[in-house]
Image (tube, coloured by chain):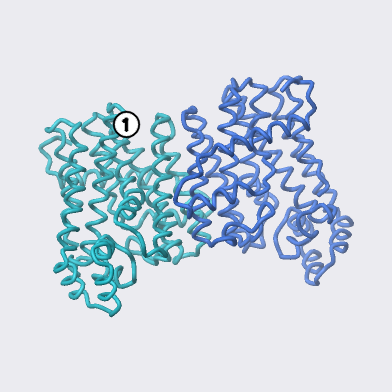
Chain colours: A blue, B cyan
Amino acid sequence: MSDTNSFPEHVQFLKGEIEKAFQKLPLDHSPDYLYDSIKYILKGRGKRLRPILVHFAGQPFNADPEDLMKVAVAVELLHNFTLVHDDIMDKDEMRHGQPAVHKQWDDATAILAGDGLFVLSQLMLSGLSPFVHQRFNEVTLAVCEGQGMDKEFENDPSISMGHYLIMIGKKTGALLGLCAELGALIGNAAKENAHHLFEFGLNLGLAFQVQDDYLEIFGYESSMGKSLGSDIRAGKQTALTILAKEKDEKKWHAFIKDNQSISAYQSFFASNGIKAETEKVIQHYIEKAKEGLDVIPKEKRRDLNQFTTMILNRTY
Amino acid sequence: MSDTNSFPEHVQFLKGEIEKAFQKLPLDHSPDYLYDSIKYILKGRGKRLRPILVHFAGQPFNADPEDLMKVAVAVELLHNFTLVHDDIMDKDEMRHGQPAVHKQWDDATAILAGDGLFVLSQLMLSGLSPFVHQRFNEVTLAVCEGQGMDKEFENDPSISMGHYLIMIGKKTGALLGLCAELGALIGNAAKENAHHLFEFGLNLGLAFQVQDDYLEIFGYESSMGKSLGSDIRAGKQTALTILAKEKDEKKWHAFIKDNQSISAYQSFFASNGIKAETEKVIQHYIEKAKEGLDVIPKEKRRDLNQFTTMILNRTY
């Protein structure tokens, strides 16, 4: 793509190429028990943000597009593997606009489909350098740790903001970090520079996830996938509830002992400074993310900067 | 180990070294939700046959013992990953002398523990050649396919012996094949020769699994982990039931429509030639397995021959 193309065109072009690469996956095999569910998952309406990030991170380092695409497909398969298993564990019933695999079939089918996706993700890396394999799996271990923390937190009301940030860093941030790092590594980046790209993705993921919690309360209902406040009303801990509890536990418990409307939550968080504090946290991680890009010459940072803006500038 | 050591001493020595290697795995981390279940699984009484096979296959090719141990631990972690997930899928409640993870905790814990074991297995291969990674994951995909076939077969009474052999080849044989192949590859074996070692393990696995079905009927109850005939009475398809059905479907269905004793099964299989035919199948795969060892000089085959004898000469 030449520099004269607009960013949205670049994103659309990459999405098209990524879908073509997915079409080429060797999935027309038996048994159907394994491959039908894998094909079903991959036709879900995922945004493909992670493979797009791989490409944007690789291009400033002159990475080979074919190798980048292998990694791009690998991280998206990895991401889908974690979603399929998490949906069973968390009993979430919808995913990417269609029933989750374990609802469409059953738990056994979904467990095996997730395993299959994970193996396919590893096979996409065939022939790439051992360090790429290593980082891929180190980060996958962090993602598993993040999911384990998330499960622990479900039954633990004493979680601090520090714990929460570690959890979402492992569960969400690390994978975005991996996308950026591997893009750079496939190119000509030294390991230390590639690590800065990991930090970029990690901090972007933290900003994104805290923002997700924020928009759950302060977003526009019409553009959210679910109704505002549904997580918080279901008793899930989010950045806002944890900050509110840390600030004044008694006041918070007095507030939530009644079933509150979304506008009551909005006023509570606004008047107690939680809204502003959350905005500060998001801004902090956006700044940190941008620092990670310092290793890339300014004139080659455009797409990664616009990518950052794109995924953070949602009002939904 | 010098050649003057007896085979059982060699096995005991390797088992000890393998346990030491397991002790060194980095499992004292948080969250407990992930690592407690992984530690629980690894203290189960597994026989460690697969890591032992890796070492025996690597030694004739002068493989580096440390690299062999990495692969040995990797295949055992991989094996345990498949057991943990299969036990959820098949609702099996006991494993290696203790409650299965999903019984000890719950399905969610077991799904994540399996995922964690699989990632750890990949990390054990860090720094080894890309071809080792590739074969490791190609075979893991075959194992997933085998499990998918097994699930399909549960509800399909029309399975032929051919289908069944493909299924157990993928589900059980391929992993033994991988152990032998990777041992050789870590050493100085060319890819083609290493592939003969894969064939050795694959066929050994087929012989082993058909023998397992055989001993379920003709073994000694006292030394079996479960009572004789329990699989067959639960309606599971085994090599013997499939052969009986293929030979004379009407006669077989007339026989099983009543609840039969184990001795009635024994007489049925013996008088209808199924016992002899099963013995022939086992013998066929033992011969084929041994052919795979032809690429190793005779004087270096001792341990692999004795390993074959060891795992087949059980009367339980």
Quadrant (top left/top right/bottom left/bottom right) for the N terminus of chain A: top right
* Residue located beneath label 1 in the image: B186
Q: Chain of mark 1?
A: B
**Is residue A226 shown above or below A138?**
below
Amino acid found under the numbered disc labelled 1: Ile
Image-based side of A227 in relation to A165, left or right:
right
Q: Residue pushed farthest left?
A: B4
Residue A273 percent location from the top left of the image? 86, 53
Residue B249 percent location from the top left of the image? 28, 68
Image-based side of B247 in relation to A252, left or right:
left
**To which quarter of the image does residue B265 belong?**
bottom left
| Label 1 SS | helix
Q: Nearer the viewer, residue A275 or B163?
A: B163
**Is residue B209 shown above or below B222?**
above
**Is residue B13 shown above or below B232?**
above
Q: Residue at x 15, y 47 (%)?
A: B8
Q: Residue pushed farthest bottom?
A: B258
Image-based side of B232 in relation to B81, left or right:
left
Q: Nearer the viewer, residue B180 or A285?
A: B180
Residue A234 percent location from the top left of the image? 72, 65
The mark tally for this picture is 1
**Is residue A283 shown above or below B223?**
above
Residue B20 percent location from the top left of the image? 32, 45
Image-based side of A185 in relation to A260, left or right:
left
Q: Around disc 1, counting alpha carbons within 10 Å, would you say few (fewer than 14), some (14 to 19), or many (20 or more)?
A: many
